[in-house]
Image (cartoon, rainbow, N blue to C red):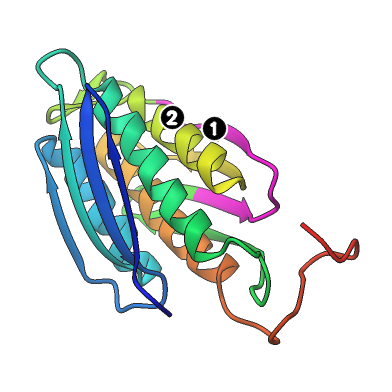
Amino acid sequence: MSIIRVRRVTRETNIEVKLNLYGNGKSDVKCDIGFFKHLLESFSLHGFFDLSLRVLGDIEVDQHHTVEDTGIVLGQAFFKALEDRKSILRSGFFIFPMDEALSLVAIDISNRPHLHYDLKFRNKFIGELQLELIEDFFLAFANEFKCGIHIKNLYGRSDHHKAESVFKAFGRALKIATLPVKRGFVPSVKGLL
């Protein structure tokens, strides 16, 4: 598998990703929002994706542009890596336990973007990360990768554990969905996605 590179430069952000879909879970993430960096590293590790990511954004204005545009760029990288949608399992899910928190993520690489998001927090921030923006990240990713994502936190006390269990489950579910299968196989009875 070749290395996929995507860069997005706007007046608000400058984000560059290098992705190896079938890597070892190595990450090199540069981001000024510490907890967001931690979540992206967890996603990379648990999905066995090699990920190099440089995230610069106008966080002096707000974190929204930075978090959402990171979802856009990552979604574009995965789309580029699997543009023909052939020879992969297509769907996957994972339930990830993290101490007292339990989260489920299911993904369908269907060429139809959709997000169902059921993750509630007690606080507005973890560290510097504005928690409501996690939904914007996943929506941007789903729209750009053209996949369906279902996220549900089943329970948990710690906002930290809830968020992290979601990103770990996201990595594992996406790894399962992208597992290689029979060469040329189109994972749809229609014969096209």
Residue 51 counted in the magenta span = no
Q: Which amino acid does label 2 sit on?
A: Glu
Q: In this view, does 173 lie to the left or right of 112?
A: left
Task: Name the residue beneath numbered marker 1.
Answer: 117
Residue shown at 54% from the left, 32% from the top: 117
> In terms of sequence position, does the residue under pointer 2 or pointer 1 come before the other?
1
Q: In this view, does 151 lie to the left or right of 22?
A: right
Residue placed furthest toward the right: 190
Name the residue: 86% across, 66% down.
Answer: 191
Residue lying at the far bottom of the rendered structure: 182
- The CA distance from mark 2 to mark 1 is 7 Å
Quarter of the image with the C terminus is: bottom right
Q: Is residue 167 left or right of residue 9?
A: right
Verify CB contact (< 8 Å) between mark 2 and mark 1. yes
Q: Can residue 95 be seen in this view?
A: no
Query: Which residue ends up furthest to the top in the rendered image?
Result: 61
The residue that appears at 20% across and 36% down in the rendered structure is 14
Q: Let me know if residue 108 is in the magenta part.
A: yes
Badge 1: few (under 14), some or many (20 or more) residues near its Cα, within 10 Å?
some
Front position in the image: 58 or 175: 58
Residue 160, relative to residue 88: is it above or below?
above
Q: In which quarter of the image is residue 84?
A: bottom right
Residue 49, given in percent of the width and then of the height, sits at 35, 68
Viewer-proximal residue, 38 or 62? 62
The residues colored magenta run 104-120
Q: Eyeballing the image, is 128 above or below 158?
A: above
Which amino acid, mark 1? Tyr
Q: Mark 2 points at which residue?
A: 135
Asked whether the viewer can see residue 47, the reply is: yes
Q: Under tag 1, what secondary structure? A: strand
Q: Quadrant of the N terminus?
A: bottom left
Disc ID at residue 35: none
